[in-house]
């Protein structure tokens, strides 16, 4: 499989300055492949995007911390993610993807290494199967660690997955708002259904991320901003923001990370909303023992 680059080598400097302590709560690392090979089941083979590049971008964009989400190309081998967390000097946590037969001792080890949750991926183009019954068992098993569950699905699956999600007792974080059609506007069927879903399920959080995937208009992503800002206003305590660097599978439309950061004040227009989105909410989920940085 050809190796592809999906990330910008020279992103612009954002005009928006994140508040000190800001968390990029959704990003990935790829490899380096020589050290951490891809899964035999990987659906894409990206160019290396390791911790040094990630942390350089973090600093350039004005962030302090990262939450690194295990990408599907590494399957259930979490070593690349753990390697990046270990290099972060306490400034990264992670979300793992695990085999259903993982032992409790291995889960404990992941916890000690900075993992705080597991991801269930329902995108057919990324994974071969998504066994709901096994996911439910895993979700129950990680409760003792006070982990949460991250779920990635597309909007057409929201109603079908609702009973599955209702059976999960932990916090649930939904990636990229379950990929709504933002071009339909804030009151289009997808955004309305998703806001109703959050309203009815107080344990569900979401990442207001991925303008570069969800927008049909492209930069400056006006359709994304119009659809997403009411959601941030309605659920200010259950939203996270992530860059999604190195933007898996975006090789045909590589986004400028600086421009993505400049969307933050457009979807979270006040300093109070920005602080919740970038600091209070991710710190509660990923660094609860540290308390919140003073304002
Ligand atoms: C994302 C989105 C994608 C990929 C993955 O694990 C992954 O490979 O999450 C995608 O292709 O939509 O969140 O990075």
Image (cartoon, helix red, strand yellow):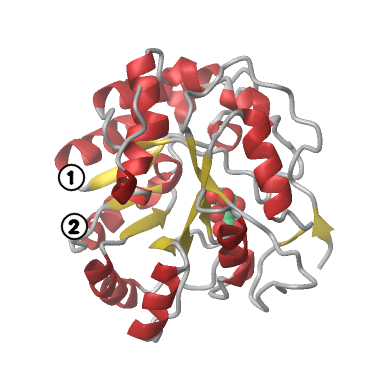
Is residue 246 rendered to the left or right of residue 48? left
Mark before the other along the chain sequence, 1 or 2: 2
Image spot of residue 172 (x, y percent): 29, 53
* Image quadrant containing the C terminus: top left
Is residue 50 rendered to the left or right of residue 107? right
In this rendering, is residue 174 above or below 11?
below
Image spot of residue 39 (x, y percent): 65, 75
Whether residue 22 is visible here, answered yes or no, is: yes
Residue 33 disc label: none
In this rendering, is residue 43 above or below 55?
below
In the image, the residue with mark 2 has its CB under 8 Å from the nearest atom of ligand 1: no
Q: Are marks 1 and 2 in contact (CB under 8 Å)?
A: yes
Residue at 38% in and 30% down: 277
Image spot of residue 72 (x, y percent): 58, 64
Is residue 118 rendered to the left or right of residue 145? right
Taking depth in this image into account, of 28 and 53 the one nearest to the observer is 53
Image spot of residue 241 (x, y percent): 46, 35
Residue pointed to by mark 1:
201
Spatial CA distance of label 1 from label 2 is 8 Å
Residue at 47% in and 32% down: 22
In this rendering, is residue 157 above or below 258?
below
Kind of element beneath mark 2: helix
Residue pointed to by mark 2:
166
């Amino acid at each position: 499989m050809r190796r592809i680059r999906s990330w910008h080598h020279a992103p612009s400097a954002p005009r928006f300055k994140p508040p000190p302590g800001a968390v990029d709560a959704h990003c990935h690392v790829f490899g380096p492949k020589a050290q951490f090979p891809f899964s035999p089941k990987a659906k894409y083979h990206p160019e290396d995007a390791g911790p040094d590049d990630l942390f350089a971008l973090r600093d350039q964009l004005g962030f302090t911390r990262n939450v690194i989400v295990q990408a599907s190309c590494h399957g259930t081998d979490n070593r690349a993610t753990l390697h990046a967390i270990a290099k972060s000097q306490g400034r990264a946590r992670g979300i793992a993807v695990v085999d259903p037969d993982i032992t409790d001792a291995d889960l404990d080890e992941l916890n000690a290494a900075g993992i705080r949750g597991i991801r269930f991926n329902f995108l057919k183009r990324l994974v071969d199967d998504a066994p709901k019954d096994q996911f439910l068992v895993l979700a129950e098993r990680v409760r003792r660690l006070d982990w949460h569950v991250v779920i990635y699905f597309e909007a057409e699956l929201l109603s079908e997955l609702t009973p599955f999600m209702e059976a999960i007792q932990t916090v649930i974080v939904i990636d990229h708002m379950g990929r709504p059609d933002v071009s339909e506007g804030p009151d289009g069927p997808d955004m309305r259904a998703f806001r109703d879903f959050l309203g009815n399920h107080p344990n569900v959080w979401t990442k207001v991320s991925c303008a570069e995937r969800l927008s049909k208009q492209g930069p400056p992503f006006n359709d994304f901003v119009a659809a997403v800002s009411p959601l941030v206003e309605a659920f200010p305590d259950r939203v996270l923001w992530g860059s999604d660097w190195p933007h898996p599978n975006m090789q045909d439309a590589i986004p400028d990370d600086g421009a993505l950061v400049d969307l933050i004040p457009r979807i979270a227009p006040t300093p109070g909303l920005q602080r919740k989105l970038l600091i209070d909410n991710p710190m509660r989920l990923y660094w609860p023992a540290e308390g919140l940085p003073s304002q």
